[in-house]
Amino acid sequence: MLVQFEIVTDKEQEGAWIRAVEKNPQIIEAIRLLEGNAGRIAVMRDGQKLFCDVRTIYYVESVDKRTFVYTKDGCYETKLRLYELEEELGPLYARCSKAMIVNLRKVRQLNSEMGGRLCATLLNGEDIVISRSYVKEIKRRLKLS
């Protein structure tokens, strides 16, 4: 991939141009990063309000109308709903069940299970189940089909 950098004299001249064959998830993520939207989300832990870098998230789960964010450092709670997080997190995250979103960059391996489901082993060693109705989309997004 060709990368060019040019120094300009005026802040208003700053910009970035991306030329690609298709607008795939990596390109969308690069655009979000350049626009400053790579982001953080507000979370809580032990009554303390914090910000979580979205790139550190392994998965997000909704349990009893509460939403939990799981990272390498632990579990946090957020006020955001899953559908809001789907929009906020971007294309490298995918719904894997009615109550869960997974970071596709954190998936180490997939194993088939009975009933058409998949078991995804994440980089932290944790296993999550991908529901049958989401298997096709997950495989497509991981370029496995």
Image (tube, helix red, strand yellow):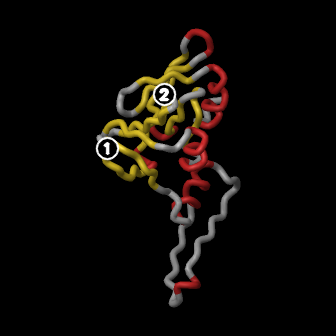
- Name the image quarter holding residue 31: bottom right
Residue at the spot 65% in from the left edge and 34% down from the top edge:
140
Kindly identify which residue carries mark 1. 47
Observer-nearest of 83 and 55:
83
Task: Please state the horizontal and vertical placement of residue 32, each as a whole percent of the image.
Answer: 56, 59
Task: Please state the horizontal and vertical placement of residue 21, each as a whole percent of the image.
Answer: 70, 55
Q: In this view, does 130 lie above or below 46?
A: above
Q: What residue type is labelled 2?
A: Val
Please report contact status of discs 2 and 1: CB closer than 8 Å, yes or no.
Answer: no
Q: Element at badge 2?
A: strand
Q: Element at badge 1?
A: loop
- Mark 2 is surrounded, within 10 Å at the Cα level, by few (under 14), some (14 to 19) or many (20 or more) other residues, namely few
Q: Is residue 101 left or right of 52 when viewed as pictured?
A: right
Q: Is residue 56 above or below residue 121?
A: below
Residue at the spot 61% in from the left edge and 30% down from the top edge:
139
Q: How far apart are marks 2 and 1 (CA)?
A: 19 Å
For the C terminus, the quadrant is top right
Residue at the spot 52% in from the left edge and 31% down from the top edge:
65
Specify the label residue 63 is tagged with. 2
Q: Which amino acid does label 1 sit on?
A: Gly
